[in-house]
Amino acid sequence: MVNSSELVAEIAALEEKLTAARDSIRKRFIGQEQVVDLTLTALLCGSHALLIGLPGLGKTRLVETLSVVMGLKGNRIQFTPDLMPSDILGSEVLETSTDGSRSFRFISGPIFCQLLMADEVNRASPRTQSALLQAMQEKVVTVAGQNHQLALPFHVFATQNPIEQEGTYPLPEAQLDRFLVQIDVHNPDFDTEKEILSATTGLHEAAATPIFSAEELIAAQSILRSIPVGQSVIDHILTLVRALRPETEHAKPHIRDSVAWGPGPRASQAIVMASRARALLQGRLAPSQKDVTDLAVPVLSHRMALNFAARARGENLPQIIQTVASNLTPMEVAA
């Protein structure tokens, strides 16, 4: 077991590398610091991220840059309606040897990497989407009854276009729950877009610099799990999550009237891990209740749904989550 002084030293060294990683990423993905921090949060937590934004906002560029900076082998799959599970996982082929004997050989698919970009994941059929489920949860792929271990670390960064929904298949709730965070990528402001134009329309573009290796990222994920989380923060997380479940006694009347289903226990686990990562990225040794409040929307919005009446009223789920998270009182937390 690592003692406190050793842990502090390891955290300080990790913070220095994370600062360098951020700087390298921002050379190619300019602005949108919150987006960068949330992607790093997903990697530090050993989990996956769902990026939602219009085409042309740099989502692919961001994931490609992350694979270089974090020292991960990356693959990209363009999801289309005709994509089959075997196109992702791989398949067995029958081979004939020189002596005439025949045997099956497994040819691995693009999922056998360390950072998989599932581009426009909601364009594939549910059958193909489900091919990712076992890999995302268990880091294993099963083909023809045989288990094939994926390389570690393994992360899936999926993208979706929030506007164009024709010909798409919404991800099932069980799969959405596997993503640590939903990251909304918005259009840049004026000054940021001006900087993007200057950086990307000349003869040369900035190149990403490798900062981590895969082994160092695994070690960082272990350090993250060693960061202590105070009991008051745990209570705050549980109170928030339970307050957003319409069937619980802690739910406000508006939650009961508007929310079809709330977040499950995996959401609480995700906030614990993400709050540790946020504290680490901000140079602190432990998470606070403010971290929980600030992470509520990206961690919870894809784990909940509004009912029909709330959608008809035009209610906004992220706004509901943020309102509840910002107005938890000490009395409610203690309860």
Image: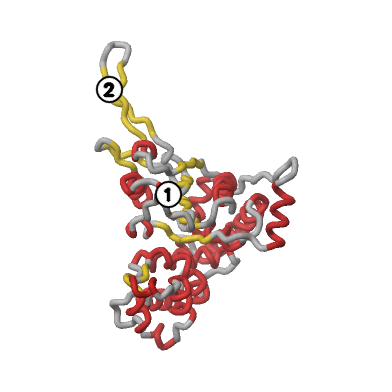
Q: Nearer the viewer, residue 121 or 50?
A: 121
Q: Nearer the viewer, residue 121 or 215?
A: 121
Write down the residue under mark 1.
121
| Residue 225 found in image quarter | bottom left
Label 2: how many Cα within 10 Å (few below 14, some 14–19, many 20+): few
Q: Is residue 7 left or right of residue 196?
A: left
Residue 320: horizontal and vertical position, in percent? 44, 76
| Amino acid type, mark 1 | Val
Residue 175: horizontal and vertical position, in percent? 35, 55
Q: Secondary structure at mark 1?
A: helix
User: Residue placed farthest to the bottom in the image?
Assistant: 331
| Residue 152 found in image quarter | top left
Does the rendering let one see residue 253?
yes
Image position of 296 with respect to 98: above or below:
below
Residue 164: horizontal and vertical position, in percent? 47, 54
Image position of 170 with respect to 310: above or below:
above
| Amino acid type, mark 2 | Ser
> Residue 103: which numbered mark, if any?
2
- The residue located at (45%, 64%) in the rendering is 273
- The residue located at (26%, 35%) in the rendering is 144
Residue 64: horizontal and vertical position, in percent? 56, 45
Label 1: how many Cα within 10 Å (few below 14, some 14–19, many 20+): many
